[in-house]
Amino acid sequence: MKTETIYNENCLETMARMPDGFVDAIITDPPYGISYQSAWRIDKTQWKPKLANDEKPCVEFLPDAFRVMKDQTPLIVFCEWRFQEVFRLAIQDAGFHIKSHVIWDREWHGMGDLKGGFAPSHDIVWFATKGRYMFPFHRPVSVLRFPRVSAEALEHPTQKPVNLIAYLIKTLTQENDLVYDPFMGSGTTAKAAHQLKRRWIGSEISSEYVELANKRLEPYLAQEALF
């Protein structure tokens, strides 16, 4: 299977073509099931259509994810606090070992219920493993502090900052490892992996976001081609 490629299809189709034990890590941010729409206060037309398959927590990919991962490898799944237990149970049911409940401190808070709820400023991250995985370098802490992408700079409604994903990739993998993101979105995982000399593969069901991701990757791939 060709690497350094974003496949414009459902991730189940991509993984069906992968052999067992193909990838070294999966780092992904699947649809949470909340019909999320970001930056709504800034531009009410910016994120149309909403994310595909965001009507319920997207956990169906996990059994296939377990199959295509090598033994003793890490899994990172971002989720939302209201559905963290759904994701935890699905990750365990797929065969993974839940190892850590990680918090991404976004530093800036979102909207939510302005009168009756705490201002949301964090996301949940499940860290799980297939088999007995050990960190290749230092042991990370469970609270990750990286400012979120500003509403004005967002190109995708759930876009994660490159330095956050790069930190995870650098902490959990080694050079030339193959990182897979089943929900590639705007290409942040690919961009971070490429910068860190990791191989990568992505799946993304939206042709609009595949085009966006490839555009974000163009400068890096073009520079590589020169050399």
Image (cartoon, rainbow, N blue to C red):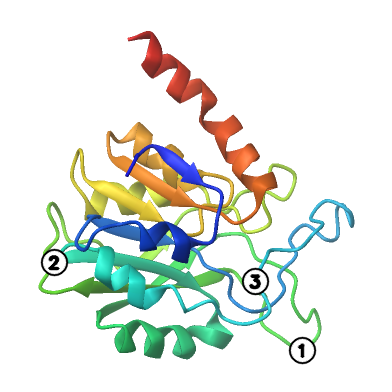
Q: Nearer the viewer, mark 1 or mark 2?
A: 2
Q: For residue 53, which numbered disc appears in the image?
A: 3
Cβ–Cβ under 8 Å for marks 3 and 2: no
Going from N to C along the chain, the mark reached first, 1 or 2, is: 2
Residue 116 or residue 137, whichever sits in front: 137
Task: Report the Cα–Cα distance between label 1 and label 2.
Answer: 45 Å
Q: Is residue 155 visible?
A: no
How crowded is the residue under tag 2: few (<14 C-alpha within 10 Å), some, or many (20+)? some
- Would you say 14 lies left or right of 94 here? right
Q: Is residue 60 visible?
A: yes
At label 3, which amino acid type do we have?
Asn
- Would you say 38 lies left or right of 217 here? right
Going from N to C along the chain, the mark reached first, 1 or 3, is: 3
Place of residue 120 in the rendered image (x, y in percent of width and height, measured from the top left):
63, 74
Q: Quadrant of the N terminus?
A: top left
How crowded is the residue under tag 1: few (<14 C-alpha within 10 Å), some, or many (20+)? few
Task: Report the Cα–Cα distance between label 3 and label 2.
Answer: 29 Å
Instruction: Name the element at disc 3.
Output: loop
Q: Quadrant of the C terminus?
A: top left
Place of residue 203 in the rendered image (x, y in percent of width and height, measured from the top left):
49, 53
- Would you say 161 lies left or right of 90 here? right
Classify residue 128 by image quadrant: bottom left
Picture mark count: 3
Instruction: Name the element at disc 2.
Output: loop
Instruction: Name the element at disc 1.
Output: loop
Place of residue 105 in the rendered image (x, y in percent of width and height, measured from the top left):
49, 64
Q: For residue 71, which numbered disc appears in the image?
A: 2
Residue 68, compared with residue 47, is above or below; it is below
Q: For residue 116, which numbered disc appears in the image?
A: 1
